Image (tube, rainbow, N blue to C red):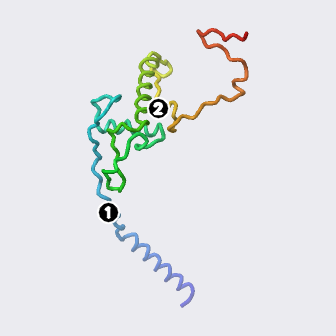
Amino acid sequence: MKTSSLSSVFAVVVLAAAVALAQSPAPAPPPAAAPRPPRTYPAPTNLKVLPKDLTGQQVHEIMEKWEAELGGHCNSCHTADPNNIGPNGKPRLKFEDDSKDEKVVARLMFAMTEELNRKYFGQIKHEEDHGKTPSVSCATCHRGHMHPEEFVPPKEEHGGPMLPMRGMPAASTQK
């Protein structure tokens, strides 16, 4: 055979293979995992600062929000129950237990932010925000950290004498 004949035969074989592949059915997708049933959350117990009529789902959503704002995890505030092991081999948490100081502090901080929002920020309306009332949350101070970082103002911004706040008497410089 001549080279041009070989090229022609090769081209016909490649074309036939391409047509055969194009006409063959697509491979079946891998079987999908069985969908998980929606997770259910038990009715909350031992609510001391959150409204008592919240559902388990609502409390779970609040806890996830706090978790993100504080950069913590459930076990940051909730104790583990060594007598109740989950399917992952780890102890489940005792959500009703109040023995961790972090849980006590979380309740105090929640009450503080609620009071700030109701008593102080609730009186402020911003026209540029279409009348929306400003508010504070855990993230206002914590910004994803369990312990808020100390704020240290840059020296170049505060090099001069402190000016009195409105309504406050100026500090005396005489001794």
Q: Are marks 2 and 1 in contact (CB under 8 Å)?
A: no
Q: Identify which residue is drawn at 41% across, 44% down.
A: 75
**Which percent across, then down, holds residue 125?**
47, 17
Give me the residue at 32% from left, 53% from top: 85
In the image shown, does 156 or 169 lie closer to the viewer? 169
Instruction: Tell me: 45 left or right of 99.
Output: left
Which of pointers 2 and 1 lies earlier in the amino acid sequence?
A: 1
Q: Residue 23, relative to residue 175: is it above or below? A: below
| Residue 166 higher or lower than 22, as above or below | above
The mark found on residue 138 in the picture is 2
Q: Residue at x 71, y 28 (%)?
A: 155
User: Which residue shows up at 34% across the image and 47% down it?
Assistant: 81
Residue of label 1: 31
Residue 32 falls left or right of residue 9: left
User: Which amino acid lies under the numbered mark 2 shown in the image of this protein?
Assistant: Cys
Amino acid at dot 1: Pro
SS for dot 1? loop
